[in-house]
Every structure is written in structure tokens, then in C-alpha cells.
Amino acid sequence: MYSINDDTITALATASGAGAISVIRMSGKESFSIVDQIFKGAKKISECKTHTINYGRILDSESNTIDDVLVSVFKNPYSYTGEDSVEVSTHGSQIVIKKIISLLTSAGARLAEPGEFTKRAFLNGKIDLAQAEAVADVINARTEASLKGARNQLDGLLSQKIETLRTELVNSSSLIELELDFAEEDLEFLPSEKMISRIDEIVKEISTLLDTYNFGRIIRDGVNVALAGHTNVGKSSLLNYILKESRAIVSPIPGTTRDVIREDVSIDGILYRFYDTAGIRFTEDIVEREGVKRSRRSIEDADIILFIYDVVNGIDKKLLEEVYSLTEKDRVMIVANKSDLSDVKEKEDEIFISAKTGEGVDKLFEELNKKNLHTKTYSESSAVVSNIRHYAALQKAKEHLLKAKESLNMNMTGEFVSVDLRSSIDSLGEIIGTVTTDDILNNIFDNFCIGK
């Protein structure tokens, strides 16, 4: 298990750059004594009550005033990290910030590593590992939906579900291991039929969580949408209409778009990344040929492909088949553009729009949401899996449970069943951090920003 050190750490908690206010954080057993070396107020910080804000000045070694500050005091265990903690609110001058942090490090603190405050919160039992990861998701949330999903995980909805399943498995495993202790007396504390029934129930619960992953991933990371089709069918015009600005060059000359242009748009709370690709066609132009190559790669990587054609010239079925060959067919939505120039009737499996007038674009957005969210509604009380690490751990837990069930059906001894139940318990424990390693923790917290 990862062990915490006794260092007192400090870092800028607010974004770097000039601003009205900046906050410098400290955590560790020497936080109060270190601040007292450079702070001049009505009384020493070490003498202040917890959860109080104290006005004073930061002084350098020659008693020169660096800045007027407010110092917030949080005494253990009633702080974010569970340790004695201090937050110094200063004016947002970069010179002031650097001087204060320099004074704190000279007085005995050290600079915090990325995510070290949250790591300490986890190691001190203030939050579990899934909640710690949700902290980063809250910070990085770009839409209402991603914020709500991260907030639910931070509030412990997923953790509570995992802990419930884990507790049920621990109880069942304990009974099987108890039977092994009394093997010579041939006692049965949990009949095989009942154990199989319990496993089936837990597998069903885990499968339900696994089924939320695609939905959760979309909520958290957004949807990659490639605009694909022939040259001059209106891909760039559609992107410009969605953005309400002239982001991509529009020209009647075929092959104008030569590289992939990416823009992010929030639609009904969901983040969509639109990739405007070069028109797919055979060309002798070396630069355009590279653009076509990148277009094909974008189609392969996209979650959704909008295959756009113009209704005046009709659909290029050969090109559509090529797009189908690059991705799964159900990822492709056929969009008929330039509906304002034609009287062609709409087809059931196509969406008619005009990138020029905006006609049908709202319907396109509606269909995009339906396709990606599968008409699911996001509940305030939903436990949703949005993290690939959690998904992989749940998959392992399920596999071990199915092996345990197979052993029971084959009337194998309790040792075989117990090993797989324990492995399943450990897999669930990896999600919330009851089972973890230095590598897992470092991989998670190294991706945090410094100061959090």
C-alpha cells in the first residue's frame, strides 16, 4: 500500500497568470508553524480556530510587506486532505505569488507534486479512489452533462454501488472459507444453489454498470463526429453554420478543404467534436491526396460519421460503400444537403438539411443525440461508469464470478470457488482503492494539475 510522507507541501491552487485574487495552498503537520514565520496578524495562525479567515500581512526576512492577505485555517481532520491545512488568499500578481511561495519553501515547505493534495485526501480516508478521479473530471468538465456525471461520482454514487457489491461478495466468500475450515466435519454454511443465485444477481448488477459505459464515456469525453463525403457537398458550410462563424473556407472550387479541421460544440449539454474532412476523391495533387488520406483516418476513428451528399447531384453510392468499409455501418448517418435547391422528397433513413438556410439542422442535432444517448435519460441518482479503468476492473470482476459459478456447477471444492471470489473482490476494490499499487496511484494523480 502506498504510504504518505510527513512533508508539508505548498502550491498555487488557482490558475497561473495575472488575476484579481490568487490562492496558495499548504498541507502538512508544519503548515501553521511555517505560515507563522512569515505572517503578521492579530494573532498567530497556530492559535486560530479551525475554519476561520484571518487578515494580516506577509513579511519577508527584512520585515518588508509583500502583500495584504487572508489566511484560511483548516485543522485536521476537518480539511480537504485530512491534515492541518492553510490557504493564503493574495492579490493575483505573479511577483507576489512567487515571493510568497519562495518564503514558504524557505521556511520548511516543499513544492507539491501534481495531484498531491487530492492524493493525500485519498490516503487519509477523506475520499476513495473513484471520488479522487472525479475531482479531475469536475475540473475538466466542459458541458453541463459532463459536470453532472463527475459530480455524481464525486458524491459517491458509483463508490456506494461498488462497495455494496463488494460487501456481498466478502460475506459470501467468508462463508465458503468457513466451510473450508470445517471441511473434516462436512458442514455447509451456504448451499451451492444459493451461492450460484447470489453470483447471478451480482453479475447482473455488474453487467448493468458495464452497459452504462458508452453513455458515461459520451457524458465525460464527448462524441467525435466526422463530416465526410464528396467535394463540394457542403461539409464546410455545415460546420460554419453550426459554429455560427466562418471557420472553414467555402469555395465552389473542388478540393478547397485539404486538412482536417476540428471544432468543439456543446449541443444540449453534450460535447461534440466535429471534424471537417477533405472531400474523398481521386486526385493527382500531393497535398490534397494527403488530406484525403487523413479524411479516411478520421472516419475510422470517429464515433459518428455524417455522410453528406447534395440532393441536386444525388448520392455517390460507391463512395458510401467505401465509408461503410472504413467503419461500422450503424455509425453512419446519411445527410442530404442543399434541400433548399431541390424538391426531392425526404427519405426515412436520411436527414434533409440546408447548410445555407439552417433548415433541418435542429432535426440533425436531435437525431445525433438519439443515436449517441440511445434515448437514455440521465438521472440525478444514476451510478454511471465513465472511466476506462473502472470498466476494465468491472469486466475482470465479472469474469472471475463466472469462473466461480462454473466451479460450483462442476461441484469443484471450495478452494477453487474461493480463489475466484477473492479475485473478483480485489477487482472491485481496485475501483475504490481498497486494493491498489504505487503504479496505479501515480498514473492517476500524475495527470492532475499542481495545486489540486
Image (cartoon, rainbow, N blue to C red):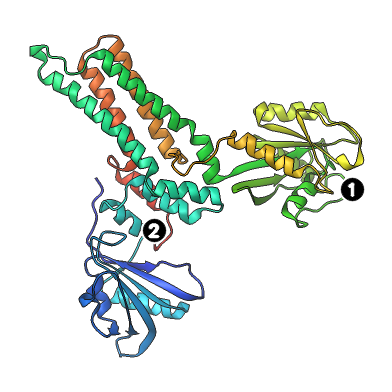
- The residue positioned 88% from the left and 42% from the top of the image is 340
- The residue positioned 45% from the left and 38% from the top of the image is 385
Q: Quadrant of the N terminus?
A: top left
Amino acid on which disc 2 is placed: Pro
- In the picture, the disc for residue 114 is 2
In the image shown, does 329 or 230 lie closer to the viewer? 329
The picture quadrant where one finds residue 372 is top right
The picture quadrant where one finds residue 183 is top left
Check if mark 1's residue and mark 2's residue have beta carbons within 8 Å: no
Q: Position of residue 14 (x, y in %)?
A: 44, 67
Q: Label 1: how many residues lie within 10 Å, few (<14), some (14-19) or many (20+)?
A: few
- In the picture, the disc for residue 162 is none
- The residue positioned 25% from the left and 77% from the top of the image is 45
Amino acid on which disc 1 is placed: Pro
- In the picture, the disc for residue 252 is 1
Q: Quadrant of the C terminus?
A: bottom left
Q: Is residue 447 visible?
A: no
Q: Which mark is first along the chain, 2 or 1?
A: 2
Q: Is residue 53 left or right of residue 372?
A: left
Cα distance between the residues tagged 1 and 2: 50 Å
